[in-house]
Amino acid sequence: MVKKQICIVNLEKTYDRPFSELVRTACQFQSRILLHYGTKQVNAKSIMGVMAFELSEGTVLTITAEGNDEAAAAKALEAFLTD
């Protein structure tokens, strides 16, 4: 299992549809990918979950990936949310 704590940067300025693009990025991997913020947890492959999560610039969250490609999955989501 890989866990990474990140701070979201430029999400809405960089992407036209950040939530759908985040889910599309997560769906490229076989690993189970979860986003954690406070007491909330959401599957990164669920568009409804991600939309309800209310991600915005400056939010500090934890990415958890578990599976065969967990390191690559965590790295890809980290890059998506912080670049």
Image (cartoon, helix red, strand yellow):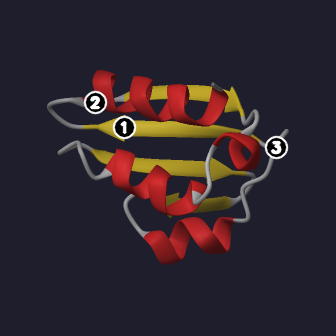
Closer to viewer: mark 1 or mark 3: 3
Residue 77 image label: none
Residue 33 is situated, as x and y percent measured from the top left of the image, at: 38, 47
Residue at 31% x, 22% y is 71
Q: Which element type, helix, strand or loop, lies under badge 1?
A: strand
Could you say which quadrant of the image residue 66 lies in?
top left
The answer to whether 7 appears left or right of 42 in the picture is: right
Q: Amino acid at mark 3?
A: Glu
- Which residue is at 35% across, 47% downward? 26
Task: Tell me where residue 76 appears, x and y as whole percent.
Answer: 41, 29
Residue matched to label 1 = 65
Type of amino acid under label 1: Ala
Q: Circle 2 — which element?
A: helix
Please state which amino acid type lies under the numbered disc 2. Glu
Q: CA distance from mark 3 to mark 2?
A: 24 Å
Judging by the rendered image, the residue that carries numbered circle 3 is 57
Q: Indicate whether 20 appears above or below 29.
A: below
Q: Residues within 10 Å of mark 1 (few under 14, many from 20)?
A: many
Q: CA distance from mark 1 to mark 2?
A: 5 Å
